[in-house]
Image: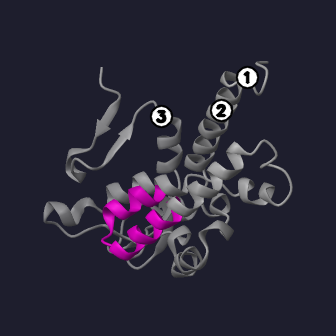
Amino acid sequence: MNDILTIGLLGEDFEMSYYDVDSILTDAQKLPCTFELEVPGLGILEGNPGENIKAGTRIDLPLWLGVMLSIGARLGTSRLVTLDLPSALSDRVVNALKADPRTVDLRSLAPHFYSLSERVLDLFEEEEMVEVLINTFKKRAAEIADHAHNPKGALGEGADFLRGLDETERQLFRVAHDSAKETRIWAGEAKKR
């Protein structure tokens, strides 16, 4: 059985792993959506059960739902909602990432920041933002590796940086830390516990 679900209407790039918790949590993150049409009986999304959602209403919806409701344009019909960039990818955040990506607390913006960014940028054509995020990851990865290879790297001023890592970066830190530890054990510099 294939554990990757491909949604045909959205193209081959829109994949989510059925069993991957991080993928599920990424798809649950909220995305601002604006309804283009009045929708009867869907007021529950606004907290008004039984009411209609009026055209122009802006609601934060889970990523998976917002994408599903916006596919009308790809099918040649009018779209139900228009997707907007999430606040985690706002101009303010992008400018901060351009200035110094190591000072931005990505976890407070979105626990799965890079996964969310990848999914959202599959929907929007934002080439400059892609470049900013690639540079952000490169600079932060170097800092993460430095903290992971230094046994005392998680102490002191590095603790704030490490607290701000998103899930992808935390996995990178764990792998780098564990490999550095195993290398020290192999070289006889540390004892296996």
Q: Which of the image's four quarters has the C terminus? A: top right
| Majority secondary structure of magenta residues | helix
- Residue for point 40% across, 70% down: 131
Q: Decide whether residue 128 is among the magenta residues.
A: yes
User: Who comes first in sequence, dot 2 or dot 1?
Assistant: 2
Give the residue pinned by disc 1. Answer: 188
Measuring from the top left, give residue 22's x and y in whole percent: 52, 41
Give the residue pinned by disc 2. Answer: 178
Measuring from the top left, give residue 58's x and y in whole percent: 47, 74
User: Who comes first in sequence, dot 3 or dot 2?
Assistant: 3
Q: Which secondary structure lies at badge 2?
A: helix
Neighbourhood count class around disc 3 (C-alpha, 10 Å): few under 14, some 14–19, many 20 upward: few
- How is the structure coloured here? one colour
Q: Amino acid at mark 1?
A: Gly
Residue 57, numbered label: none
- Residue for point 73% across, 59% down: 161
Magenta-tinted stretch: 116-137
Q: Nearer the viewer, residue 121 or 42?
A: 121
Q: Decide whether residue 84 is among the magenta residues.
A: no
- Residue for point 51% across, 60% down: 138
Q: Which of the image's four quarters has the N terminus? A: top left
